[in-house]
Image (tube, rainbow, N blue to C red):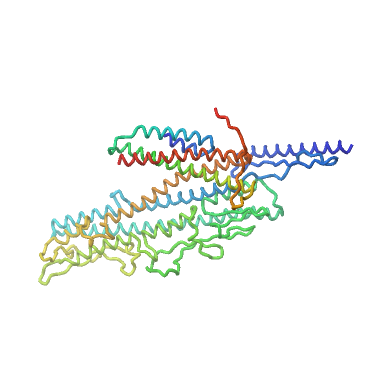
């Protein structure tokens, strides 16, 4: 359920959303590790585990896609604003030095 | 005095500039829900400060379209995959309806009934009613295979129609953009028109569900479209229309005559661009028509699994019947084959399979000559085809039922995969659309900081997902 919620959140991937996702994923991982089921054939639990696995894979696809998008955009932004490095790579955009205060 | 005038002019310029900023903002608000519209922002440029004439201040720079090609391309790329997977799922659903696995009709039902009839015949080898039942169930079996063959042909024809309609749709959408290009060229300026830009992007997004293409914004303001990145569909105001035709390619030479033709996509100069066209709805239709369907119904280079099944069934049954005797004589009267099909065309076996109408119940051979002679040896051997113990009684290493099951499972698996991919792809399109909104008109410094934050958050999530993936896999393995 939490992983599915994380998938929904990953549809609008911002750093803030990703931070919230990691809380959900961490809680799911902790729950799963803490409640290891009996190693016997159990059809409903097996079905549930398969659904969870599919949701985790879905989250992976969404996360990787969001990252690829951000990375591609950063490269393009770098090339537009700062040109290319001597090695031919798009130059990185300097985010400058900033303080970030978190509550 | 001149300084006062210069100051007033500068103030008026600045006011004018801020007024334009306001107009752009209002334009953004008014068009917020227009399909394909991107936020615009006005760049304010500093005027040189050089008294007495030039007193600095701000002026409106060129109107910058903050829509970036990158975000648009990302949406179109995901839409192309979605169009492909969605079409694949739809086509495979049609195909799955041909491959019944319920056992209540179609080939598995007919196979089951046929084996039951030969089993009953083996109990009473001389019974005319039991013999007639074998002939009738054999005819039903042949009919079921012919029906499946006809249904596959129907799916192929539907796919051809859909492919033709899709090609027309592609030409129409490209034609719309050609119209915009024409207007731009006629106006003689590459000035930015936000309304037209929105229409172009909206049309390109629609087009991306049908085909895989790349676009370029030319310096004169027109849009160039290349199919699969290489075949021109639109350059300036010249459109290069696609066409679709059914054809039997001359090379490689056909192994099987009378094979169903293949669908061919042609560029405007007649070049065959079928192989390169794999993305979007059109790519899926070509794949179904030229790859998936031929694996069942055959083509110039393969027999097709339905024909293999039909020939396997007919040959195994005929071989057993002709190896037996109708009577032990003297002289012993040999059996005759039950099934007939077009032997000259291996790709037409399923379509032509039938029971020889001249065969009578009395002509079915029941006696296995041996030694030792067995009076019901042939029907016993026929009933063993249901669960063969000898590889000679199998088709490509499988029983007839298993062979059909594999065909149905193949379609089922491909359909399941396409449905799952469609579901995931829908969310990827939604994500790309959201990201397009996010990066439109964002401050560059802000963007650089977001990139750093994103990288950090991505790495944390990625590690967690790797752990969760392994944990769920371990759980599944434990429960299996």
Percent x, y of residue B280: 49, 52
Residue B273 at least partly seen: yes
Quadrant of image for the N terminus of chain A: top left
Residue B19, x across and y down, in percent? 73, 37
Q: Residue furthest front?
A: A86
**Which image quarter holds the C terminus of chain A?**
top right
The residue depicted at 31 percent of the width and 67 percent of the height is B342
Measured from the top left, where is residue B254 in percent x and y? 40, 69
Residue depicted at 44% across the width and 37% down the height: A4
Query: How many numbered marks, from 0 up?
Result: 0
Q: Is residue B363 left or right of residue B233?
A: left
B15 relative position to A12: left or right: right
Residue B437, picture quadrant: top right
Residue at the extreme right: B1
Q: Is residue B31 among the parts visible in the rendering?
A: no
Outermost residue to the bottom: B331
Q: Of all residues shown, which one is farthest toward the top?
A: A103
Percent coordinates x, y for residue B32 in the rendering: 61, 39
Left or right of B91, for residue A96: right
Residue A101 found in image quarter: top right
- Which residue occupies the foreground of this view, B264 or B245? B264
């Amino acid at each position: 359920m939490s992983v599915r919620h994380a998938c929904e959140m990953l549809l609008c991937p911002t750093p803030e959303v990703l931070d919230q996702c990691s809380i959900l994923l961490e809680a799911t991982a902790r729950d799963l590790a803490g409640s290891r089921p009996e190693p016997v054939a159990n059809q409903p639990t097996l079905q549930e585990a398969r659904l969870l696995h599919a949701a985790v894979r879905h989250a992976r696809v969404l996360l990787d896609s969001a990252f690829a998008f951000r990375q591609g955009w950063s490269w393009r932004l770098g090339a537009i604003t700062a040109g290319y490095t001597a090695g031919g790579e798009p130059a990185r955009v300097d985010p400058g030095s900033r303080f970030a205060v978190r509550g | 005095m001149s300084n006062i005038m210069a100051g007033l002019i500068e103030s008026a310029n600045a006011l004018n500039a801020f007024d334009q900023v306001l107009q752009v903002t209002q334009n953004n608000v008014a068009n917020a829900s227009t399909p394909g519209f991107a936020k615009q922002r006005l760049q304010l440029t500093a005027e040189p400060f050089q008294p007495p004439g030039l007193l600095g201040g701000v002026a409106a720079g060129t109107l910058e379209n903050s829509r970036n090609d990158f975000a648009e391309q990302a949406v179109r790329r995901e839409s192309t995959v979605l169009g492909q997977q969605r079409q694949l799922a739809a086509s495979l659903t049609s195909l799955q309806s041909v491959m019944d696995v319920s056992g209540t009709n179609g080939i598995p039902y007919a196979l089951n009934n046929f084996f039951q009839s030969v089993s009953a015949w083996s109990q009473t080898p001389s019974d005319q009613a039991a013999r007639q039942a074998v002939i009738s169930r054999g005819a039903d079996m042949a009919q079921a295979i012919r029906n499946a063959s006809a249904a596959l042909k129907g799916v192929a024809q539907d796919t051809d129609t859909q492919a033709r309609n899709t090609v027309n749709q592609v030409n129409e959408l490209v034609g719309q953009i050609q119209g915009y290009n024409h207007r731009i060229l006629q106006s003689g300026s590459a000035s930015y028109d936000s309304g037209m830009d929105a229409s172009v992007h909206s049309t390109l997004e629609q087009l991306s569900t049908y085909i895989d293409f790349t676009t370029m914004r030319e310096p004169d303001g027109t849009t160039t479209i290349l199919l699969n990145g290489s075949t021109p569909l639109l350059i300036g105001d010249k459109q290069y229309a696609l066409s679709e035709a059914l054809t039997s390619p001359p090379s490689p030479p056909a192994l099987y005559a009378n094979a169903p033709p293949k669908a061919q996509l042609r560029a405007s100069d007649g070049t065959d661009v079928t192989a390169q066209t794999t993305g979007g709805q059109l790519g899926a239709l070509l794949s179904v028509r030229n790859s998936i369907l031929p694996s069942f119904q055959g083509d110039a280079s393969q027999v097709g699994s339905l024909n293999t099944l039909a020939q396997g069934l007919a040959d195994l049954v005929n071989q057993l019947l002709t190896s037996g005797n109708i009577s032990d004589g003297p002289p012993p009267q040999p059996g005759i084959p039950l099934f007939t099909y077009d032997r000259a065309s291996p790709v037409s076996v399923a379509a032509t399979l039938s029971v020889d109408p001249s065969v009578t119940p009395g002509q079915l051979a029941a006696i296995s000559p041996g030694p030792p002679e067995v009076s019901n040896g042939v029907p016993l051997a026929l009933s063993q085809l249901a669960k063969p113990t000898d590889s000679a009684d199998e088709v490509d290493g499988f029983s007839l039922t298993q062979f059909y099951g594999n065909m149905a499972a193949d379609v089922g698996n491909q359909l399941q995969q396409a449905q799952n991919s469609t579901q995931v792809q829908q969310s990827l399109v939604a994500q790309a659309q959201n990201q397009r909104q996010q990066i439109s008109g964002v401050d560059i410094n802000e963007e650089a900081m977001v990139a750093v934050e994103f990288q950090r958050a991505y790495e944390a999530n990625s590690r967690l997902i790797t752990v969760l993936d392994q944990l769920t896999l371990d759980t599944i393995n434990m429960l299996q």
